[in-house]
Amino acid sequence: MQPVRVTLQEGMHFLGELDGFGIHIDADESVGGKNKGPRPKGLSLISLAGCTAMDVISILRKMKVEPEEFYVDVAAVELTDQHPKVFKKILLKYYLKGTDVPRKKVEKAVELSQTRYCGVTAMLEHSAEIDYEIVIEEV
């Protein structure tokens, strides 16, 4: 993995550089931010959702399952009380829509992602309990 850089723009606004892409980040207005980008902690939730979503769709495709729609919502359900405030509980919700989306195959794909393949889960589960739900809508 190549090094990542964040460069101060102004106030608490930084520009992150990763793999040639720019990502603006900023702090909350209560601590001097100007809402010019997401908060860094929230980006770790995007990383978690992206990591597991890529795993799950890849595994499902190997199982010959192709949903018409697929997305993952993630929420930090609980934070610790003391600084540094870290995620204490995270909830992932996997949403799939389509005809013939077998629940057993989806459950297996999610389980494999969460227990074997998703490196972001592996990092975050040291400090947070990570739960998940699966919602399948038949068309």
Image: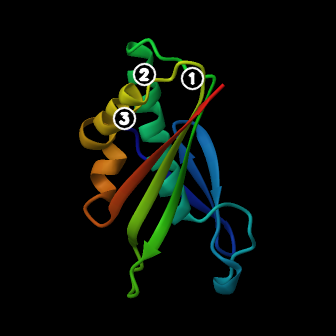
- Which disc is residue 107 wearing? 3
Q: What's the distance in space between the residues labelled 2 and 1, CA to CA? A: 9 Å
Q: Position of residue 50 (x, y in %)?
A: 50, 41
Q: What element carries label 2?
A: helix
Q: Where is residue 122 in the image (x, y as percent from the top left)?
A: 27, 49
Please, what is the three-letter code of the amino acid marked with disc 3?
Answer: Glu
Using residue 75 as the reference point, say whether residue 33 is left or right of it. Answer: right
- The answer to whether 98 is drawn above or below residue 62 in the figure is below
Q: What's the distance in space between the residues labelled 3 and 2, CA to CA? A: 10 Å
Q: Where is residue 94 in the image (x, y as percent from the top left)?
A: 50, 42
Q: What element carries label 3?
A: helix
Q: Which of pointers 3 and 2 indicates the residue nearer the eye?
A: 3
Quarter where residue 130 is shown: bottom left
Using residue 41 as the reference point, say whether residue 127 is left or right of it. Answer: left
Q: Do the residues labelled 2 and 1 touch (CB within 8 Å)?
A: yes
Q: What's the distance in space between the residues labelled 3 and 1, CA to CA? A: 14 Å
Which residue corresponds to mark 1?
A: 67
Please, what is the three-letter code of the amino acid marked with disc 2?
Answer: Leu
Mark 1 Cα within 10 Å, few/some/many (few <14, many 20+)?
A: many
Which numbered disc, 3 or 1, marks the residue that appears first in the sequence?
A: 1
- The number of callouts visible is 3
Q: Is mark 1 on a helix, strand or loop?
A: loop
Which residue corresponds to mark 2?
A: 60
Residue plotted at (42% across, 39% down): 52
Quarter that holds the C terminus: top right
Please, what is the three-letter code of the amino acid marked with disc 1?
Answer: Pro
